[in-house]
Amino acid sequence: MNLEGKKILLVEDDPDQIEMYVLEAELKGLEILNAKNESEALELAKQEQPDLILLDMLLGEDYGMDVLKKLKSNDKTKNIKVLFLTNFKKKNLIEEAKEAGAEELILKADYVPSQVIEKIEKYL
């Protein structure tokens, strides 16, 4: 699949994670935007209308599930596909994420960046 011109919003606050996913995504022709917290994520999602959002669950003081619920309750962002990309584990988290509107929850420890990009391709 040609990903050229597709825009992804990566909501992640760890610089090493950001670099790793940006490098892999750019190799595939994806344009990557980065937000490090809830307010940046909501603002960029509204302004840039990305094709998909990769959202970490733990963002410093912010919680990814809250970000997802705000995205899904806003007319400008409610139709953007969201994949959680996290190492946070909690009972029933996958079900909770899907009920809130996420397409999928990807555990970082289970996938290398190229596999995450393959998951993105599936949803674009």
Image (cartoon, rainbow, N blue to C red):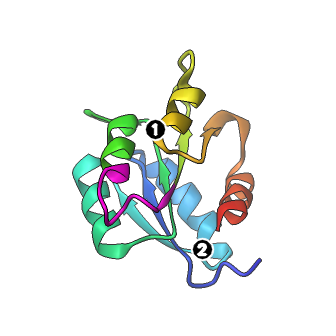
In the image, what residue type sits under mark 2?
Answer: Glu
- The quadrant of the rendering that contains the C terminus is bottom right
In this view, 37 is above or below 26: above
Q: Is residue 61 magenta?
A: no
- Secondary structure under tag 2 reads helix
**Is residue 36 visible to the viewer in this orientation of the structure?**
no
Picture coordinates of residue 21, whole percent (x, y): 57, 58
Picture coordinates of residue 74, whole percent (x, y): 29, 56
Q: Which mark is residue 100?
A: 1
List the residue tagged with mark 2. Answer: 26
- The quadrant of the rendering that contains the N terminus is bottom right
Picture coordinates of residue 37, whole percent (x, y): 29, 48
In the foreground, 40 or 80: 80
119 sits to left or right of 79? right
Q: Which segment is the magenta one?
A: 71-81
In the image, what residue type sits under mark 1?
Answer: Ala
In the foreground, 54 or 92: 92
Which quadrant of the view contains residue 29? bottom right
- Secondary structure under tag 1 reads helix
Q: Residue at x 39, y 62 (%)?
A: 34
Q: Residue at x 72, y 43 (%)?
A: 111
For disc 2, the neighbor class at 10 Å (few under 14, some 14 to 19, many from 20) is few
